[in-house]
Amino acid sequence: MELAVYNIKGEDTGRKVVLNDSVFAIENPNEHVVYLAVKQYLANQRQGTHKAKERSEVAGSTRKLGKQKGGGGARRGDINSPVLVGGGRVFGPRPRDYRFKLNKKMKDLARKSALTFKAQNNQIVVVEDFNFEAPKTKEFVNFTKNIKLEGVKVLLVLADQNKNVYLSARNIESANIISASQINTYKVLDNKALVLTESSVAVLNELD
C-alpha cells in the first residue's frame, strides 16, 4: 500500500511511502484478539484500590442488642451487623489487581489488526518529519487545520520523542502524541485519524 506524503502546510510533497502489507494489510485481522488487547490495556490502568469495611472492621460495641428469637425481625447481634444502618457491608469490595497477561503473538496480531482496520477505513495520513522552533499550541492547531483534521481526535506517531511537538499538543484534548516504539492497539483505535511521520512509518514497517 502506498500513501502520499504531505508537508506541515498540508501540501503534497510528491513523494510516497510504502506501508508494509504484513503490518497494515494483513489477510485476516482478528477482532476478538483486538478486543482482548483493548480489555487488557484498560484493565492494567485500573488502580484496584476500592475498599469497603466489613463487619469486623466497623468500630462499635460488640454487645448483643436484642434476643435471638421473638423479636419479629431478622436476627442481629451487635451494632456492627450488616442488617443495621451504619453496620458493616456484606462481601464488600476489596483491593485487587485487575491485570492479566496476553501472549506476545496475540498482542502483535491485535496491533497489526488495528493498523489494518485504520488503513482499510482510509484513516491514515502520512506527513514529512517536522519540528517546531518552540512549544506553541497555536502551531499544532494550524498543523491540524492544514491537514484537514481540525477538531478531529488524532494520534500523531513520531519516530522518536520530540519535546516541542509534545508540549505544543499537550493542551489539545483531541490530540495525542506517541512514539512508534510505544504504539499499542488501544492507542491506534482511540482516535479518528492516525497521523504518521515518514520516519515513524519506517519503524512501524519493521513490526513484522
Image (spheres, grey):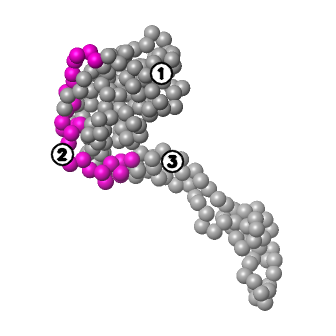
Query: Which numbered mark, 1 or 3, is in the foreground of this view?
Result: 1
Residue 46: give its label: 3
Label ID, residue 141 = 1
Callout 1 secondary element? helix
Mark nearer the N terminus (2 vs 1): 2
Q: Is residue 103 left or right of residue 177?
A: left
Helix, strand or loop under label 3: loop
Q: How many residues crowd around disc 2 within 10 Å: few (fewer than 14), some, or many (20 or more)?
A: few
Callouts 2 and 3 close, C-beta under 8 Å: no
Q: Residue furthest bottom?
A: 70
User: Disc 2 designates what residue?
Assistant: 27
Could you classify mark 3 by the number of other residues whose Cα lies within 10 Å: few (under 14), some (14-19), or many (20 or more)? few
Mark 2 → mark 3, Cα distance in angstroms: 34 Å
User: As displayed, is residue 38 above or below residue 131?
Assistant: below
Question: Mark 2 vs mark 3: which is more N-terminal?
Answer: 2
Which amino acid type is shown beneath numbered disc 2?
Answer: Glu
Question: Is 4 one of the magenta-colored residues?
Answer: no
The tag on residue 206 is none
Query: Residue at (60%, 67%) from the top-left corner?
Result: 91
- Identify residue type, mark 1: Val
Circle 2: element type: loop
Between 206 and 191, the residue placed more toward the observer is: 191
Pointer 1: residues within 10 angstroms few (<14), some, or many (20+)? some
- Quadrant of res 8: top left
| Residue located at (35% from left, 52% from top) | 36
- Report the span colored magenta: 12-38
Q: Is residue 144 left or right of residue 54?
A: left
